[in-house]
């Protein structure tokens, strides 16, 4: 029970701090781009009739709070996954190894899915949500499992299987919208994609490194 409490403590502290930090980065990078996209979306003909009753946080305190809460909860959730794996496999961990695990998380959760489903701005044309969610989940799981196989397996057969798993979602292809026209400028989309990947990379490095440091510190004190 004491070991379990230590894992929860590490996840809450590391995930909460990493989430809070990336929430601040989002206010400086992605949020202004989202606001710019919403201004284009509001000028689109027929926009007012699309979802008249849909709630969204108002610009200012509501949006900042919603972003921060979402980022903190996501940070804690991802940290729980990391520390659970470390505890289950009895991995020797420190800040540097933790940061390497963070890079793996970034590749699996952000980079691989973005190759088929780039980060979306309001007003972007998208395929049906269930199809996108399914493809995203399968891609993240296969990428994480395949990276583990490529790095940890000693068998050539397992490594070849892992390589196939890494490529499979992209060979199948992500679900795409029937209509691809958008009012959003290409420059705005590009800047948003770069901002999302940049903030995500910072988040995963901090999350992995901080989780590794706290794990090592708690293990020494156990």
Image (cartoon, rainbow, N blue to C red):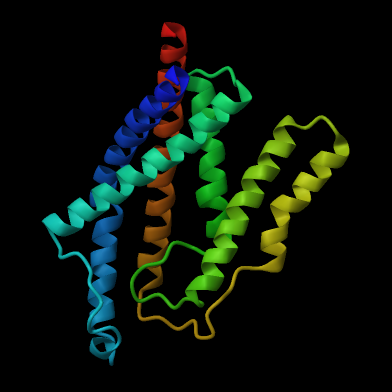
Q: Position of residue 57 (x, y in %)?
A: 19, 64
Front position in the image: 64 or 89:
89
Q: In this rendering, is residue 146 above or below 220?
A: below
Pick the quarter of the image with the N terminus.
top left
Q: Where is residue 96 in the image (x, y as percent from the top left)?
A: 50, 21
Pick the quarter of the image with the C terminus.
top left
Asked whether the viewer can see residue 132, the reply is yes
- The residue that appears at 42% across and 45% down in the rendered structure is 200
Splitting the image into 4 quarters, where does residue 147 fall?
Answer: top right
Q: In this rendering, is residue 190 above or below 181?
A: above
- The residue that appears at 19% across and 51% down in the rendered structure is 65
Splitting the image into 4 quarters, where does residue 210 fall?
Answer: top left
Q: In this rendering, is residue 129 above or below 4?
A: below
Q: Position of residue 157 (x, y in %)?
A: 87, 41
Question: Is 206 on the left or on the right of 90, as rendered?
Answer: left
Q: In this view, which residue lies farthest toward the left?
A: 61
């Amino acid at each position: 029970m004491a070991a379990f409490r230590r894992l929860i403590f590490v996840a809450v502290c590391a995930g909460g701090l990493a989430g809070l930090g990336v929430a601040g980065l989002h206010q400086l990078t992605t949020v202004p781009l989202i606001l710019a996209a919403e201004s284009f979306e509001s000028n689109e003909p027929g926009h007012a009739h699309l979802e008249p009753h849909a709630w969204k946080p108002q610009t200012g305190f509501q949006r900042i709070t919603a972003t921060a809460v979402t980022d903190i909860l996501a940070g804690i959730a991802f940290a729980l996954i990391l520390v659970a794996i470390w505890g289950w496999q009895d991995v020797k961990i420190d800040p540097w190894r933790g940061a390497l695990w963070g890079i793996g998380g970034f590749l699996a959760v952000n980079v691989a899915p973005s190759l088929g489903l780039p980060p979306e701005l309001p007003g972007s044309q998208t395929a049906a949500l269930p199809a996108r969610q399914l493809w995203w989940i399968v891609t993240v799981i296969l990428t994480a499992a395949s990276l583990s196989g490529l790095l940890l397996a000693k068998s050539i057969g397992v490594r070849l299987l892992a390589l196939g798993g890494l490529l499979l979602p992209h060979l199948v292809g992500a679900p795409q919208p029937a209509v691809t026209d958008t009012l959003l400028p290409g420059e705005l989309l590009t800047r948003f994609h770069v901002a999302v990947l940049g903030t995500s990379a910072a988040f995963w490095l901090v999350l992995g490194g901080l989780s590794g440091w706290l794990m090592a510190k708690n293990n020494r004190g156990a």
